[in-house]
Image: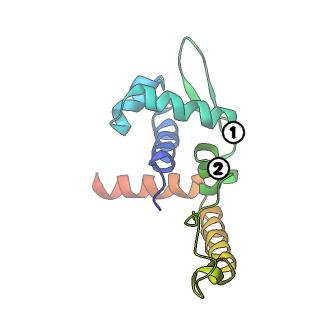
Amino acid sequence: MQFSNRLTMATHILLAIEYFGNDYKITSDFLATSVNTNPVNVRYILSQLKKAGIISVNAGTGGASIIKDPDNITMLDIFKAVEDTDKDLFHFHENPNPDCPVGKNMHKLLDDKLEGISESMYQEMSKTTLNSLIREMHGLNKQTS
């Protein structure tokens, strides 16, 4: 299974807001240039981040800003803001054959293991803060200047 690109786009957007926020008006058109996507895609992600309480957006005049402390925003927070986390990470095939010795045991064999894998992914995502990404991004920019 592959997730959409919304996590990486949302992270890109947040990093661009932080990086350019003091020098430019942060509009969806501005962000779309950095992300290299359509402004409609950016507006959709901005609305999800706003709903999650991570950013504010000034309607009409434009301008997005991060309103939550970047030390308190994790990649898991961003992921939950932009992805449908009500669904299980792994989707089981619908009807394993209950008369087959393999098919009838698939859920017993895999449910706990797949849940553990999902939980591990969420734990890893919760270890990375937006602030740590900001610091790393600034460091990378200094290296390439």
**Is 30 rendered above or below residue 77?**
above
Rounded to the nearest angstrom, the CA distance separating label 1 from label 2 is 8 Å
Q: For the image shown, how many numbered marks are present on the structure?
A: 2
Instruction: Give the structural element (helix, strand or loop) at label 2.
Output: helix
Q: Is residue 4 left or right of residue 55?
A: left
Depth order, front residue of 115/109: 109
Q: Quadrant of residue 51?
A: top right
Q: Residues within 10 Å of mark 2 (few under 14, many from 20)?
A: some
**Is 143 rendered above or below residue 26?**
below
Residue 86: image tag: none
Marks 1/2 in contact by CB < 8 Å: the verdict is yes
Task: Give me the residue at 69% from left, 51% from top.
Answer: 86
Question: Which residue is disc 1 drawn over?
Answer: 52
Which residue, as the protein is rendered here, is positioned at the far left? 145
Task: Give me the residue at 64% from left, 65% from top.
Answer: 122
Q: Measured from the top left, where is residue 131 in percent x and y?
A: 59, 53
Question: Which residue is disc 2 drawn over?
Answer: 80
Q: Measured from the top left, where is residue 106 in percent x and y?
A: 61, 80
